[in-house]
Amino acid sequence: MVRLPVVQLQGELQLEVMKTLWRLDAQVGVEDVRSKLPADKQGAYTTIQTILNRLAERGLVKRKRHGKNVFYRAAVSEADYYSRSLKEALAPASDHARRAALAQLVGDLNPGELTEIEELARDVSARRDR
């Protein structure tokens, strides 16, 4: 995926649209997205189209035209989006506060998640040592 500056999602519907794009992981049309949204979020076709276009203007979504049809795809992965959002949120914090915040997040993980994070940390450390 392309590295983009962190752009925060604005509102619950934008988040639901992005979650749907991440889940579908393909080029999709407006109706494809709309039909996969939770029932209480399935707004009008034009509402979803506007949200997709705004997300594209902000660099979170890629827009591609095929004839008269327009298709959309997430321009950034869900993991990358949240990773960069977290980095931006913690950037102004002191080293101590940053470590404490991360420790609290890790403390909230279940044992399986903690094991997975430990494995990922070892992988990152091994790559740095190369």
Image (cartoon, helix red, strand yellow):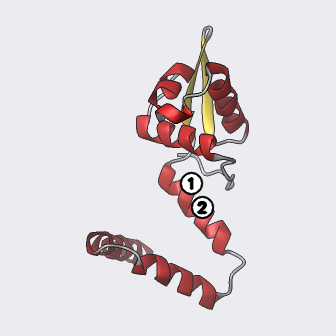
In the image, which disc is placed on residue 81?
Answer: 1
Give yes or no for contact between labels 1 and 2 (Cβ–Cβ under 8 Å). Answer: yes
Query: Up-down: is 109 above or below 95?
Result: above
- Residue 84 is marked as 2
Residue 111 image offset from top left, x and y in percent: 27, 75
How packed mark 2 is, by other alpha carbons closer than 10 Å (few <14, some 14-19, many 20 or more), is some
Vertical comparison of 40 with 124: above or below: above
Residue 55: x %, y % from top left: 67, 38
Could you tell me which residue is drawn at 56 percent across and 54 percent down?
81
Disc 2 on helix, strand or loop?
helix
Q: CA distance from mark 1 to mark 2?
A: 5 Å
Which disc is residue 26 wearing? none
Q: Residue 105 placed where, x, y %?
A: 47, 76
The image quarter in which residue 16 lies: top right
Instruction: Choose top left, top right, bottom left or bottom right for residue 123.
Output: bottom left
Q: Is residue 123 above or below residue 31?
A: below
State which quadrant residue 41 falls in. Answer: top right
Q: Is residue 128 left or right of residue 85?
A: left
Looking at the rendered image, the quarter that the C terminus falls into is bottom left
Is 2 in front, or is 26?
26
Closer to us: 86 or 48: 48
The residue at the point 62 percent across, 41 percent down is 14
Q: Tell me the kind of residue under disc 2.
A: Arg
Left or right: 31 as drawn, with respect to 7: left
Secondary element under disc 1, as helix, strand or loop, is helix
Instruction: Kindly identify the amino acid type of the residue bearing the numbered disc 1.
Output: Tyr
Q: Residue 47: x percent and y percent?
A: 67, 26
**Is 111 situated left or right of 86 in this image?**
left
Question: Which residue occupies the extreme front position in the image?
Answer: 40
The 10 Å Cα crowd at callout 1, few under 14, some 14 to 19, many 20 or more, is some
